[in-house]
Amino acid sequence: MEKPGIVLSREELLKLVWGGSIHVELRTVDVHIRRLRRALNEGGEKDIIRTVRSAGYALDSTPGDSDEEE
């Protein structure tokens, strides 16, 4: 993770993942986020994808990262 904590809107995620040349519904991001969460949390791991209401999604630091407050 290069920049944990940075909030990206659905629109920003769509442009980063699919580019601007294809039409994809905004809710498609939610479906993919749900699938990512399911895959990442399969072993009971902490959910590192944070939903930021009315803003988008962010990646939280993983346990053991040096940028967490002590």
Image (spheres, rainbow, N blue to C red):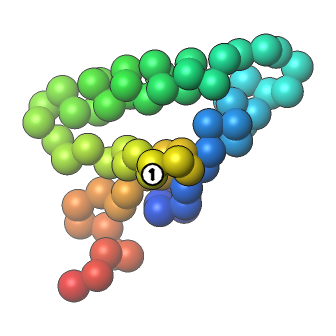
- Rendered-image quadrant of the C terminus: bottom left
Q: Position of residue 41 (x, y in %)?
A: 22, 33
Residue at 32 percent across and 48 percent down: it is 48
Residue at 28 percent across and 82 percent down: it is 69
Residue at 71 percent across and 16 percent down: it is 24
What residue is shown with label 1?
52
- Tag 1's secondary structure? strand
Kindly give the residue lying farthest to the bottom in the view shown: 70
Q: Is residue 64 above or below residue 55?
A: below
Q: Position of residue 63 (x, y in %)?
A: 23, 61
Residue at 46 percent across and 19 percent down: it is 31
Q: Is residue 25 above or below residue 57?
A: above
Kindly give the residue lying farthest to the left in the view shown: 44
> Is 54 or 1 nearer to us in this picture?
54
Sort mark 1 into few (<14), some (14-19) or many (20+) by Cα contacts within 10 Å: few
Q: Position of residue 2 (x, y in %)?
A: 55, 58
